Image (cartoon, rainbow, N blue to C red):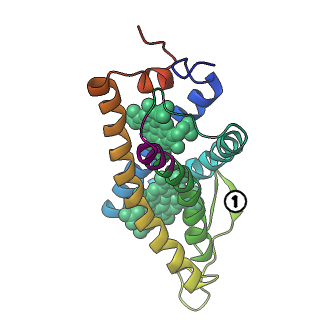
């Protein structure tokens, strides 16, 4: 495969599916936690757990195939920066759903996938209507991680999109086109 050929269809499909889920979930997460939109919580958790399955497939594929190389020769420093950014984005796709599950699970709120319970809600027998954490320290750790990694994700994705646009409009190379499944020219 030449460097400017489209990336394999499975790589492209997984990239765009996971990207859409991550951005959608980050938007919903920010909105629901600020506006107390409780009805959205089960949707966010269910789609987040489903996203984790796709993310796992994508990570296995990346471990087998490695990251795509540059479309044209670049400096070793630029190559290192791209590998570092893509590696961190991949790590965040894994850490976001995991931290959400640790938070929701350990806090006693529980979570599942569209009605199928994975970690049950735990009522506090001493305080009716309140939840009893399974592990309050772990819940707080998960909450802080989910919050701050969410901001890091949004920052890196912004840089990532700007880099893709720079490749396309300024360098005029095929970096964006090969991720869209098109050939340059
Ligand atoms: C898969 C990717 C996911 C992404 C990108 C994501 C992103 C986010 C973001 C950005 C927030 C707002 C955080 C804040 O500003 O404090 C949030 C909130 C939240 N997320 Fe996720 N999330 C994901 C998966 C999950 C999963 C799998 C669960 C649980 C099973 C979960 C549970 C929650 C909960 C309970 C909140 C509300 C936190 C609060 O009320 O303070 N998330 N999510
Ligand atoms: C509109 C948003 C996005 C655009 C325009 C975009 C564009 C691209 C492009 C053009 C590449 C190929 C880079 C190359 O060939 O060297 C790429 C790769 C990559 N992107 Fe994105 N991307 C977007 C969103 C995201 C999001 C939200 C994530 C993760 C949360 C992400 C993670 C990655 C990773 C890890 C790679 C490395 C190759 C791979 O694993 O498929 N991207 N992206």
Q: Is residue 149 above or below residue 143?
A: above
Q: Main SS type for the magenta part?
A: helix
Front-most of 121 and 147? 147
Q: Quadrant of residue 170?
A: top left
Is residue 2 rendered to the left or right of residue 150? right
Residue ID at (44%, 20%): 177
Give the crowd class for mark 1: few <14, some 14-19, many >=20 residues within 10 Å: few
Residue ID at (38%, 22%): 173
Q: Position of residue 35 (x, y in %)?
A: 31, 60
Is residue 110 rendered to the left or right of residue 170? right
Residue 10 among magenta residues: no
Residue 129 seen in render: no
> What is the span of residues highlighted in magenta in the rendered image?
74-83
* Residue lying furthest top: 185
CB of mark 1 near ligand 1 (< 8 Å): no
In the rendered view of the protein, which quadrant contains the C terminus?
Answer: top left
Residue 79 among magenta residues: yes
Q: Position of residue 71 (x, y in %)?
A: 48, 26
Residue ID at (55%, 49%): 90
Front-most of 171 and 21? 171
* Residue lying furthest left: 170
Q: What element does badge 1 sit on?
A: strand
Q: Quadrant of residue 126?
A: bottom right
Q: Position of residue 85 (x, y in %)?
A: 46, 50
Q: Position of residue 143 (x, y in %)?
A: 48, 72
- The residue where tag 1 is placed is 117
């Amino acid at each position: 495969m030449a460097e400017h050929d489209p990336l394999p269809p499975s790589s492209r499909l997984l990239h765009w599916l996971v990207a859409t889920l991550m951005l959608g979930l980050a938007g919903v997460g920010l909105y629901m936690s600020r506006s107390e939109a409780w009805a959205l919580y089960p949707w966010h958790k269910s789609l987040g757990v489903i996203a984790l399955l796709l993310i796992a497939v994508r990570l296995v594929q990346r471990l087998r195939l490695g990251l795509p190389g540059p479309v044209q020769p670049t400096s070793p420093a630029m190559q290192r920066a791209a590998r570092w950014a893509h590696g961190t984005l991949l790590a965040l796709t894994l850490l976001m759903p995991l931290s959400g599950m640790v938070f929701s699970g350990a806090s006693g709120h529980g979570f599942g996938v569209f009605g199928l319970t994975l970690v049950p809600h735990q009522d506090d027998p001493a305080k009716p209507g309140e939840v009893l954490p399974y592990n309050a320290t772990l819940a707080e750790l998960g909450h802080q991680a989910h919050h701050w990694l969410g901001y890091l994700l949004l920052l890196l994705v912004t840089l990532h999109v700007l880099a893709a646009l720079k490749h396309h409009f300024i360098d005029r190379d095929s970096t964006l086109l090969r991720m869209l499944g098109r050939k340059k020219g």
